[in-house]
Amino acid sequence: METRIANFQLVESLLLGLVAERRRQPQDDLISYLLDTTLSLPGVPPRPLTDEEIVTHAKLIMVAGGGTSWRQIGITLFALLTHPEQLEQVKADRSLMDAAIEEGLRRDPTAPYHYRLVLEDVDFYGHRIKAGSALELGLGPANRDPARWTNPDAYDIHRPPLTNMAFGLGTHRCLGMNVARVEIGTGINALLDAFPKLRLDPAAPAPFLTGGLEQRGVSGLPVLLK
């Protein structure tokens, strides 16, 4: 515990020092952008972000993409390994990797639910939602809407490309989504290059998705390499 506290304090100190440095000499980076940002909230005069708010945002950016990348690598691999015919197609034509990743994001996003606080009364498709309400937004279910996707529960890398909700949409679109996509593709391509016979171990317990409704991933991927 003492080590964790010391590491927390170190990161806090480094980021606060960086904020102070960028305040003196702005550069083309995130901290400088946040220092120049105005926060506008209902009923409150616009104001600059505090140093603590900037540090909190920076810490979020530092860790947010990592969990998505490694969990989604497992989810995409799990889908390909359980659909060997599509795995062979991806191995033969690596240009299909982007579609394989996107289909994994659509079918099984690692963060299928998000929560939002309602700041003011609003009418939403005939429903009155009062300020102070907490909304549970099902992005995962939206990604399996049968009105948008044919046979939505199936994993199919040859689907017509349509935007899904795995990384959000609109003003809250995942800041690290493009980095995550590159990391996932690079990781899986490297595995397929190194182990072209990669396959699930039939003697091992079957993998399954786990982790609840917010940070889902595969229980494990016992594989054979040769």
Image (tube, grey):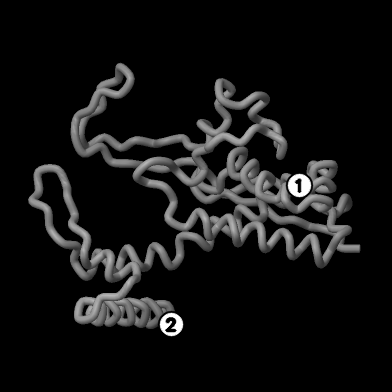
Question: Which amino acid is tagged 1?
Answer: Leu
Q: What x and y, as percent, mark residue 171?
A: 34, 44
> What whole-number distance in Å separates the C-alpha atoms at marks 1 and 2?
40 Å
Q: Nearer the viewer, residue 56 or 93?
A: 93
Give SS at disc 2.
helix
Q: What x and y, as percent, mark residue 43?
A: 9, 43
Q: Nearer the viewer, residue 183 or 208?
A: 183
Query: Residue 149, located in which quarter of the rendered image?
Result: top right
Q: Is residue 6 left or right of residue 185?
A: left
Question: Which amino acid is tagged 2?
Answer: Thr
Q: Nearer the viewer, residue 163 or 220?
A: 163
Mark 2 residue crowding within 10 angstroms, few (<14) / some (14–19) / many (20+): few
Residue that numbered label 1 is attached to:
80
Residue that numbered label 2 is attached to:
3
Which residue is rendered at x = 22% and y = 60% of the image?
A: 37
Q: What x and y, as percent, mark residue 224?
A: 86, 60
Mark 1 residue crowding within 10 angstroms, few (<14) / some (14–19) / many (20+): many
Q: Pick the quarter of the image with the C terminus.
A: bottom right
Q: What x and y, as percent, mark residue 113?
A: 46, 41
